[in-house]
Image (tube, grey):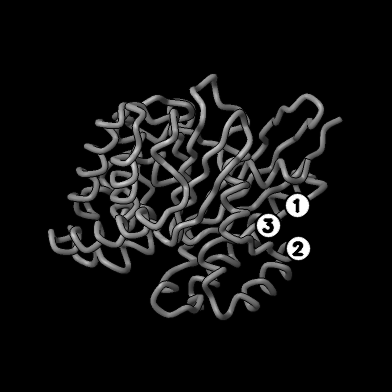
């Protein structure tokens, strides 16, 4: 028996919707709708601890749009998950009330640990046969989740307060960033990775998910447009990924926006995310990075199965 569900993932940079038919017995999903809007909900939160009113307005407009899509699709169950930006904000109650008014559900403001578990559940469910254990890296706008697991089960997870938006706002203020800014960002990222309790060096397979990593994959693949089918489960040489990250970091925002696969709302912050990818991969041992288009959004959906 299938169940039609709607999952919403509201992060620091984007808000995404998935409407899918789940068959829990067969373990299959038939996706009907996948949508993303870049609303930059976490704009300035690292500095102010407060959700910006314009960012709230953009997010609420996306919620109103999604409400219509969900109603038209006839989803029976819905879950709205909010992550890093909302965890850090002192006006999260205003955000929660606005979401409930428009969608009829209160957002689950999940902990970093639960965010990591949902990401792993989404990414690991349909992985091809890979060496175990698997490290899933979910790099968002405000945080990066590291989840180490085996045979579909997470064994250790941690959420680090380093993400594409947070690192860009904190360090990469020039366009393109200066060598001093990049060095400061590297120091910050390395310090966070040094504190990580998840042993990234133990992974036999590394899987990267979410928009920064999939966009870096599009760069490596030389795509003329963003193509989820070519990106999903692509196996990329780590050396090529690190080289792509370095090129992205060095490019201006205008140059990044000229790349046909680049979402225009990601171009100004992807440098911070690319730097995290490069520094993290330098600590891992596999020579290949596996890319997945399935992530926390899919994990949210399956939590409703």
- The residue beneath circle 2 is 105
Residues tagged 3 and 1 counted as in contact (Cβ below 8 A) = yes
Pinpoint residue 175: horizontal percent, then vertical percent.
19, 61
Question: Which of the two residues, 49 or 192, is positioned nearer the viewer here?
Answer: 192
Residue 268 visible to the viewer:
no
Which residue appears at 39% of the width and 42% of the height? 213
Residue 52, compared with residue 135, is above or below; it is below
Circle 1 crowding by C-alpha within 10 Å: few under 14, some 14–19, many from 20: many
Circle 2 crowding by C-alpha within 10 Å: few under 14, some 14–19, many from 20: some
Q: Is residue 288 left or right of residue 174?
A: right
CA separation in Å, label 3 and label 1? 7 Å
Residue 188 visible to the viewer:
yes
Which type of secondary structure does the marked residue at label 3 adopt?
strand
Please identify the residue farthest to the top as the structure is shown: 129
Q: Is residue 104 left or right of residue 117?
A: right
Pinpoint residue 32: horizontal percent, then vertical percent.
67, 36
CA separation in Å, label 3 and label 2? 7 Å
Quarter assignment of residue 126: top right
Residue 13, compared with residue 203, is above or below; it is below
Pinpoint residue 174: horizontal percent, then vertical percent.
19, 65
- The residue beneath circle 1 is 78
Question: Which of the two residues, 106 or 260, is positioned nearer the viewer here?
Answer: 106
Which type of secondary structure does the marked residue at label 2 adopt?
loop
Q: Which of marks 2 and 3 precedes in the sequence?
A: 3
Which residue appears at 29% of the width and 47% of the height? 279
Quarter of the figure that contains the N terminus: top right
CA separation in Å, label 2 and label 1? 8 Å
- The residue beneath circle 3 is 80
Residues tagged 3 and 2 counted as in contact (Cβ below 8 A) = yes
Quarter assignment of residue 239: top left
């Amino acid at each position: 028996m299938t169940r039609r569900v709607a999952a919403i993932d509201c992060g620091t940079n984007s808000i995404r919707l998935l409407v899918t038919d789940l068959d829990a017995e067969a373990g299959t999903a038939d996706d009907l709708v996948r949508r993303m809007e870049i609303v930059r909900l976490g704009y300035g939160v690292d500095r102010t601890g407060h959700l910006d009113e314009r960012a709230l307005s953009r997010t609420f407009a996306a919620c109103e749009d999604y409400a219509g899509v969900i109603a038209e699709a006839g989803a029976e169950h819905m879950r709205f998950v909010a992550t890093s930006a909302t965890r850090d904000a002192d006006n999260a109650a205003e955000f929660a009330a606005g979401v409930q008014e428009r969608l009829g559900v209160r957002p689950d403001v999940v902990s970093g640990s639960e965010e990591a578990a949902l990401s792993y559940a989404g990414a690991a469910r349909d992985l091809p046969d890979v060496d175990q254990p698997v490290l899933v890296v979910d790099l968002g706008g405000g945080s990066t989740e590291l989840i180490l697991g085996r045979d579909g089960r997470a064994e250790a997870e941690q959420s680090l307060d380093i993400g594409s938006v947070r690192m860009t706002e904190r360090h990469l203020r020039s366009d393109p960033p200066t060598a001093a800014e990049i060095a400061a960002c590297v120091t910050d990222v390395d310090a966070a990775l040094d504190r990580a309790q998840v042993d990234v060096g133990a992974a036999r397979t590394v899987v990267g998910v979410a928009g920064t990593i999939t966009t870096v994959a599009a760069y490596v693949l030389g795509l003329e447009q963003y193509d989820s089918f070519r990106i999903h489960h692509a196996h990329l040489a780590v050396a090529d990924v690190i080289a792509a990250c370095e090129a992205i970091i060095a490019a201006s925002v205008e140059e990044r926006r000229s790349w046909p696969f680049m979402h225009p709302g990601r171009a100004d912050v992807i440098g911070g995310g690319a730097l995290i990818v490069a520094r993290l991969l330098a600590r891992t041992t596999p020579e290949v990075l596996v890319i997945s288009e399935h992530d926390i959004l899919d994990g949210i959906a399956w939590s409703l199965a």
